[in-house]
Amino acid sequence: MSSRPPLDPRLTEQRNPATTDIDRLSALEIVRVINDEDHRIAPAVAGQLEQVARAVEMAEETFRAGGRLIYVGAGTSGRLGVLDASEMPPTYGTDPRMVQGIIAGGPRALTNAVEGAEDSREDGARAIDEMQVDANDFVFGIAASGTTPYVHGALTRAKQRGAKAGFLLCTHPQEWMLQVYDVVIAPLVGPEVVTGSTRMKAGTATKLVLNMISTGAMIRMGKVFGNLMVDLRATNQKLQDRSERILMETLDLDRHSAAALLDEAGGSVKTAMVMRWCRVNREKATEMLMRAGGRLGEILGGEERR
């Protein structure tokens, strides 16, 4: 390997010295090398936990103000943002508008490469205008390389419209980013196994961070009690079963009684728990939850958690 400086300063575009001969390895040797590199991901994310926590706080503030968390990205980064957003309604019973994802090139880019879509700052800005972003929103840009024009165009317009702006990248952030954006998260996972293939380590780090932001915010919003997702709604067989089991475990009910209580609560686990523990009807339970900001623990107080 040459000792000369890298041609591109971005970590995501540099060659990994541990994998320069990977094309000569056996299948087992290849996956061992990939696995060795993957061990670098969690420590890199751990080095950014204070910034991630700030993003969680900003997301919570956004939700309590009636705003939206909007992910913006291109390629793998955009797909991961859309994925995280799409998992919120079935997991936490949220309105689909609460967390949304924008990907350069539009919905078609989720399954097909839309060449050149990431290169337009104007298109990124236009997407923010079309979403009618305002001061209550939190727009979170994702770009492993740190340089995607579409993403920076979107964040610039979001700031112009008064929104908070966050940025996730997997290379060293430039000073101006730290000055302009409200939070910058930069897990430095190092060069990829295959040079520039940021769907690998950078993509995994991105998913870990997005999971933390959305999950942390949902916990803070009271959508988790203990470690149970109590704000889900029984909209299919799997969720019906999970909802009944949560009620069986927390309220010491048999399956039949849990199913009956869930039906009486309109399919809402959280409402059912308040109804049972506080001995109130569905309307009163709903009112109590609204007053408590959705936080079940504030209503139940010192009730035993099983």
Image: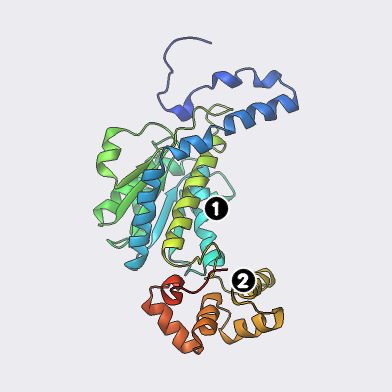
The answer to which of 196 and 177 lies nearer the viewer is 177
CB-based contact (under 8 Å), mark 2 and mark 1: no
Marking on residue 12: none
The answer to which of 155 and 302 lies nearer the viewer is 302
Q: Please provide percent x and percent y for residue 116.
A: 46, 40
Q: Does 300 appear above or below 122?
A: below
Query: Is residue 105 visible in this depiction of the protein?
Result: no
Looking at numbered disc 1 in the image, what kind of residue is underneath it? Arg
Looking at numbered disc 2 in the image, what kind of residue is underneath it? Ile
Which residue is painted at 71% across and 21% down in the image? Answer: 25
Q: Which residue is mark 2?
A: 246
Q: Please provide percent x and percent y for residue 136.
A: 30, 63
* 2 vs 1, front mark: 2
- Asked whether, in this view, residue 295 is left or right of residue 76, the answer is left
Q: Quadrant of residue 58?
A: bottom left
Q: Does 27 appear above or below 294?
A: above
Marking on residue 108: 1
